[in-house]
Image: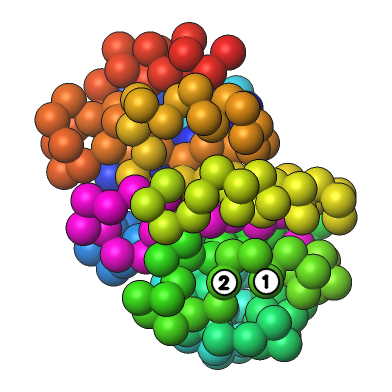
Amino acid sequence: MKVLVSPMSIEEALESVKGGADIIDVKNPAEGSLGANFPWVIRSVGEIVREHNRLLSATVGDLDFKPGTASLAALGAAFAGADYIKVGLFGIKTENQVFEMMKNVVRAVKDHNPSAMVVAAAYADHSRINAVSPLSIAEPAYRAGCDGIMVDTAIKDGRNLFEFMSREMLEKFVNLAHERGMFCALAGSLSWEHISALKDINPDIIGVRTMVCENGRNSMIRSNLVAKLMASVR
């Protein structure tokens, strides 16, 4: 498993790199679970990431069904240097909408940088926001040309991924991706107690923040905690 860490500042990005994280993720929690940050922040973090031979991820928002808006946002993230571009399917309600949204995002990104990876991200707590189920996105995302799929939690109220999806459901999510040649990522207030189950489920990527912060989600990421996590999953 690769480990993706989501810093909120340049200082936290440096801590994440120092701790050995595989992927550094740029987001803006003030705008939601997968809130988009500014292009200049993505570029600045990207400079640090590339100096240390790591990969850069960027979120483009918890989005409604607006393929044009999503495509422009995704192109912006790609132009700013992101290796992974994650699209939150927040307002997406059907498989057809997943396909229409993601095929346009994929075209926008790949026309600029064919090697950039597009990720369709659904939410484990989809019933709380009336959005498409994570178990329904693999096929339309695959047909749209996505490289990977992801599940996170939409509402950050302390409830975690495993409270909304059973281990069997998460294994199915992973298998649905792998059967179609896509990678998959799991995130959503993951904690140290989940490490064993995550290793058994074996997604390609796990995304974290809270568990590598010194005192909760809104405190500082520390390199020693990132290093501890890397040692735990390897």
The residue that mark 2 highlights is 133
Query: Left of 47 or right of it: where is 78?
Result: right
Q: Considering only vertical position in the picture, is 51 above or below 130?
A: above
Q: Are marks 1 and 2 in contact (CB under 8 Å)?
A: yes
For mark 2, give the secondary structure.
Answer: loop
**Residue beneath the point at 69% across and 51% down:** 172
- Work out whether residue 122 or residue 167 is closer to the camera in this orientation and state it: 167
**Residue 205 seen by the camera:** yes
Q: Amino acid at mark 1?
A: Ser
Query: Left of 155 or right of it: where is 173?
Result: right
Q: Position of residue 151 (x, y in %)?
A: 53, 56
- Work out whether residue 10 or residue 106 is closer to the camera in this orientation and state it: 106
**Residue beneath the point at 47% across and 40% down:** 207
- Quarter of the picture containing the N terminus is top right
Q: Amino acid at mark 2?
A: Ser
**Residue beneath the point at 16% across and 37% down:** 216
Give the residues drawn in magenta, as a range. Answer: 146-161
Q: Position of residue 164 (x, y in %)?
A: 42, 57
The residue that mark 1 highlights is 136
**Residue beneath the point at 76% across and 48% down:** 175
